Image (tube, grey):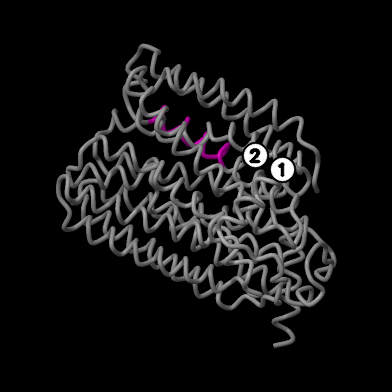
Amino acid sequence: MAEHDVSQSRLFEWLTGDEDSRLCDDIPEGACSEQPRNFFLHLWASLGNKLADELSSARLVLPWLMGIIGAPVWMIGLLVPIREAGALLPQILVAGFIRLKPKRKGVWVMGAILQAGTAFALAGLALTGSGSMGGAAVLIVLIVLSLARGLSSIASKDVMGKTIAKRRRGTLMGWSGSIAGAATLVAGGVLILLGDQPGNLALAVLLCVAACSWLLNAVCTARIKEVPGAVEGGENAWDSIKLGLSLMKDDSTFLHFNVSRALLLSSALALPYIALLGQQQSGADLGGLGLLVVVSGIAGMVASPVWGKLADQSSRRVMRNAAIGTIMCCLLGASFAWLPGDWTQNVWPYALVYGLLVIVHHGVRLGRKTYLIDMATQDDRALYIALSNTLTGVLMLLVGGVIGALAQWLGSAALLILLAVTAVGAMLSAHKLPEVE
């Protein structure tokens, strides 16, 4: 057992680039000796969560599912807003509840188990769903999945803040993204090979793998050694909202961060429209879906460790540089849609831009997650995360609805130009944020 602990500590030091695995910053003293063990449990838990997210993606997999069961087109437009807003909106309401618990990993486990159940339900709908009723059932299940995702999101960040030291959190998220990207790459390759197989069966298998990945997340989370934290300051939902709004007024850095995060929604909102341009060239062929999944997997595998290391040095710069990347990808995707030539009439050019934007979006996610965790303290981290996520959820619903209407009117290519302009604002805002590392 001692030899295992030594080898685990050495691997931890190699992955994080540190020479002393006992260096602890901003975590309780009692969590210091458990940090190498907890690091790898976080790594595997995050792998399960990220892989499940990719294999049940509202940007790729669920639109294919809705198409196969014959759901109305307007329902497909609700997938991304429900997935994102449903996970974010309720978080301010549960922040006080989580705050009252000295150990928060149980909330994380509960969220993971609920997500696994919804993935199994979606797999069943892939085999039995049909038409409007099937589409409505998918949306209902997706609402439950998103609410469970919100529970896991706030609890996982709070547990990470208590168990993993500063300047190692971005690295952890980067490595987990890389490993999940490799696993997603394998799943996409299988889809390409099964391109001529019945789509509903292949999607059902894919969603079952997602469910098992969330169960892996639950098992690893349950084994994390979490020291009890402060429980003072737990609030009911209304008190949490009032306290959160006062924080927005009193903490200018937090307000500035949320402005930057809102503008950075452009990367998330652009992804489904670039995928849509590619889907129009490949139809419902699972080979086209497999190609986009493979591209997404490669992008995550390559990008996440790099962004993670950079985020530990300066998450502010990561957010700014990711905004610049969003501008370039949106402009490139729009240009492909307008350029003449046979080479633009297949899925490959859009798959390339999609992959580049996935790389950029990983930077957005890792940058803003690391910034938020490092900006907050142990006493207010859960509330800061919940408030920021709730505000983003409101904006996702409002902006997502407007963007959908504009896409119907202007077309996907013109919409990408508008999102590029939004990303310019994100770049300028993020550049002016103060450093927190």
- The boundaries of the magenta stretch are 348-361
| Residue situated in front as seen by the camera: 158 or 18 | 158
The type of residue carrying mark 1 is Phe
* Residue 358 falls within the magenta-colored stretch: yes
Q: Position of residue 415 (x, y in %)?
A: 43, 21
Is 177 on the left-hand or right-hand side of 31?
A: left
| 395 versus 43 height, above or below | above
Dots 1, 2 in contact, CB < 8 A: yes
370 sits to left or right of 223: right
Look at the numbered disc 1 and give the secondary structure of its residue.
helix
Q: Main secondary structure of the magenta part?
A: helix
Q: Residue at x 38, y 34 (%)?
A: 275
* Residue pictured at 18% horizontal, 58% vertical: 127
Left or right relative to 382: residue 314 = right
Q: Does 36 appear above or below 389? A: below
C-alpha gap between disc 1 and disc 2: 6 Å
Taking the spot 22% from the left edge, 55% from the top edge, the residue there is 126
Three-letter amino acid code of the residue under disc 2: Asn
Give the vertical position of 315 relative to 208 (above or below): above
Q: Position of residue 8 (x, y in %)?
A: 70, 74
* Disc 2 packing (10 Å; few <14; some 14–19; many ≥20): many
Image quarter for residue 128?
Answer: bottom left
Q: Is 23 part of what is drawn in magenta? A: no
Looking at the rendering, in which quadrant would you find the N terminus? Answer: bottom right
**Horizontal and vertical percent for residue 19?**
84, 64
Residue 258's disc is: 2
In the image, is 105 to the left or to the right of 203?
Answer: right
* Mark 1 burial class by Cα count in 10 Å: few <14, some 14-19, many 20+: some
Q: Which residue is mark 1?
A: 254
For the residue labelled by badge 2, is the local secondary structure a helix, a strand or a loop?
helix
